[in-house]
Image (tube, rainbow, N blue to C red):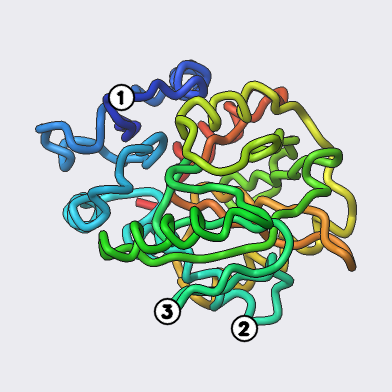
Amino acid sequence: MRVALAGCSTIDDPDEPLLVGALDRVGVAATGLPWDAETDWSSYDLVVVRSTWDYVERRDEFLAWADAVPRLANPASVLRWNTDKRYLAELAAAGVPVVPTTYVTGTFAPPPGEYVVKPTVSAAGLDTTRYGPGQEAAARSHVARLRAAGRGVIVQPYVHAIEEQHETSLLYLGGDFSHGARKGPLLAGTTVGATDSTDRAGAQAMAAGPRAPSPEERDLAEAVLAAVAVAVPSPLLYARVDLVPGPDGPQLLEVELTEPFLFLGTSEGAADRLATAIADWPS
């Protein structure tokens, strides 16, 4: 079996060597390639979308590429649904407790307290900034800039509990729960003005470690994936459910089905579990 691991040419995925080694152990030959490389994707038995972290400004091109790949995991229909954060409204309507999310469609009125402005299409914190009282003008300018570029905008309250309790990521591989991870706060200490999103995401990944999700977090993650299965009924090779503390229990921040960092190095056997799921992926 020959597998391509689709990534990007600008950022290395620290999980890739672990996965390539695990695939070799199950008899799968893996090659890492940028998703926009000029290659015959049909020559591979499976193309696994991994670290395609530069798709944001070329989403239409990325989705057209996904549509053209004969065997892709996760499938193109999942990528189309998951690469626009409007999916959060769909999950909230299905009863999933989601961090309160406002979609900016008219005049933007900055909310009270601290809040986060982000585009609906983003990765690694790109164009995501935290604001607070006295920073209304900067927040309005940020929203106006995104909308002028034709990008959707969402606003969420800043969850201060993240700074002490951090985020909890639940990783599912081949449809089964694999492991949990703790993610450091991406926007802690930041105010107005963009910092480099790659540096922020890298620092967050470096601060990560193993975490055993609570029963409540496990239950919520299962409910999230059940709602996803209704919204986009396709098999999932991998899924990462990111939860944050809420006033009445855990809340969903995001569900990552496109290019999540999988924290394979934080759990013994995680790379082997993903390799087995790839080897067993339906033909």
In-front residue for pair 88/28: 88
| Pointer 1 residue | 10
Disc 3: CA contacts within 10 A as few (<14), some (14-19) or many (>=20): few
| Pointer 2 residue | 93
Q: Earlier in the sequence, mark 3 or mark 1?
A: 1
Q: Circle 3 — which element?
A: loop
Q: Amino acid at mark 1?
A: Thr
Q: Circle 2 — which element?
A: helix
In-front residue for pair 80/274: 80
Select label 3 or label 2 by which is in front: 3
Q: Earlier in the sequence, mark 1 or mark 2?
A: 1
Q: Residue at x 45, y 30 (%)?
A: 196
Disc 1: CA contacts within 10 A as few (<14), some (14-19) or many (>=20): few
Distance (Cα) linking label 1 and label 2: 37 Å
Q: Is residue 264 left or right of residue 279?
A: right
Q: Residue at x 37, y 24 (%)?
A: 11
Instruction: Give x and y (percent) for residue 143.
Output: 42, 62
Image mark for residue 105:
3
Callout 1 touching callout 2 (CB < 8 Å): no
